[in-house]
């Protein structure tokens, strides 16, 4: 891990919207993508979870800096739900980043300078018509269309592993912690997120196709929840190392 790639300062932003899809994947297929000492955060000891978060951020900047120095970005993160037991015995629940995308080169450059989130720049467009929202990218080969309609009872995705929205809400990111591994020094970098006004609203997913997910060729994968969170002040604390 390069000297600067350790989240050396706190960062804050305003989430105008965060759209989150979570796929259940058989643990035998997903666990090979999680480096030790992290372990999968499992449901019924059978399913691990791969989640996609599409976040429209405003005024992203080092914490404490004035808003006019912030920048607006669209961010996409592909993450796995994991657990980590610290050197002091605390059991933390969080996320391990597989890949990150953004709509601006500036965010790619700065993001890869201060983190190991593997940012790349791509085209991202979001269009809203009434209750319907479409997010898509030609370069990254993904598209999704969902409805925010709230009248009537929202149904879980058809093949969800969860029996109810109550169970599904346990697996809605972002979780309090994100982890990065420095295997050369046997260290885990822990980044803690702090949020306000966090209310996840179920959405009705109409279509969704992601080339990044398809390339894994998982045999047992099921879309299991879909949520949107809007208007959330958020910040990430400075990274902290823990010996593993």
Image: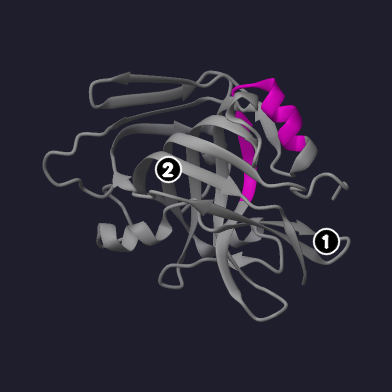
Residue extending furthest toward the bottom: 89
Is there a contact, CB below 8 Å, between mark 2 and mark 1? Answer: no
The part of the image, by quadrant, that contains residue 70 is top right
Crowd tier of the residue under label 2, counting other residues whose Cα lies within 10 Å: few below 14, some 14–19, many 20 or above = many
Number of residue marks: 2
Compared with 103, 220 (above or below) is: below
Q: How is the image coloured?
A: one colour
Helix, strand or loop status at disc 1: loop
Snapshot quadrant of residue 65: top right
Question: The C terminus lies in which quarter of the figure?
Answer: bottom right
Which numbered disc flags the more N-terminal residue, 2 or 1?
2
- Please state the extent of the stretch shown in magenta in the rendering: 97-112
- Front in this rendered view, residue 19 or 159: 19
Which quadrant would residue 229 be assigned to in this image? top left
The one of 174 and 230 positioned closer to us in this rendering = 230
- Residue 34 sits inside the magenta stretch: no
List the residue tagged with mark 2. Answer: 20
Task: Say left or right for 49 vs 34.
Answer: left
Q: Position of residue 235 (x, y in %)?
A: 57, 46
- Residue 163, percent across and down? 26, 62
Task: Pinpoint residue 81: horizontal percent, then vertical percent.
Answer: 53, 58
The residue positioned 77% from the left and 41% from the top of the image is 114
What residue is shown with label 1?
183
Between the C-alphas of marks 2 and 1, the distance is 30 Å
The correct choice, above or below, for 95 with respect to 28 in the image is above
């Amino acid at each position: 891990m390069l000297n600067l790639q350790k989240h050396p300062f706190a960062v804050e932003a305003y989430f105008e919207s965060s759209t989150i899809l979570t796929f259940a994947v058989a643990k035998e297929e997903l666990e090979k993508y999680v480096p030790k000492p992290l372990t999968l955060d499992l449901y019924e000891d059978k399913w691990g979870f791969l989640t996609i978060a599409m976040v429209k951020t405003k005024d992203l900047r080092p914490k404490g800096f004035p808003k006019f120095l912030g920048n607006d970005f669209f961010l996409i993160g592909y993450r796995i739900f994991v657990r980590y037991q610290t050197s002091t015995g605390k059991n933390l629940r969080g996320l391990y980043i597989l890949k990150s995308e953004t709509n601006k080169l500036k965010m790619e450059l700065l993001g890869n300078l201060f983190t190991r989130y593997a940012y790349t720049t791509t085209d991202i467009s979001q269009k809203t018509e009434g209750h319907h929202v479409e997010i898509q990218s030609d370069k990254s080969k993904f598209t999704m269309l969902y409805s925010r309609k709230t009248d009537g009872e929202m149904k879980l995705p058809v093949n969800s592993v969860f029996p109810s929205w109550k169970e599904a809400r346990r697996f809605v990111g972002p979780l309090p912690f994100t982890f990065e591994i420095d295997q050369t020094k046997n260290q885990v970098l822990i980044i803690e997120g702090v949020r306000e006004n966090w209310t996840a609203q179920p959405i009705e997913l109409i279509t969704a196709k992601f080339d990044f997910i398809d390339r894994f060729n998982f045999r047992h994968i099921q879309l299991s929840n879909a949520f949107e969170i809007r208007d959330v002040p958020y910040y990430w604390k400075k990274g902290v190392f823990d010996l593993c």
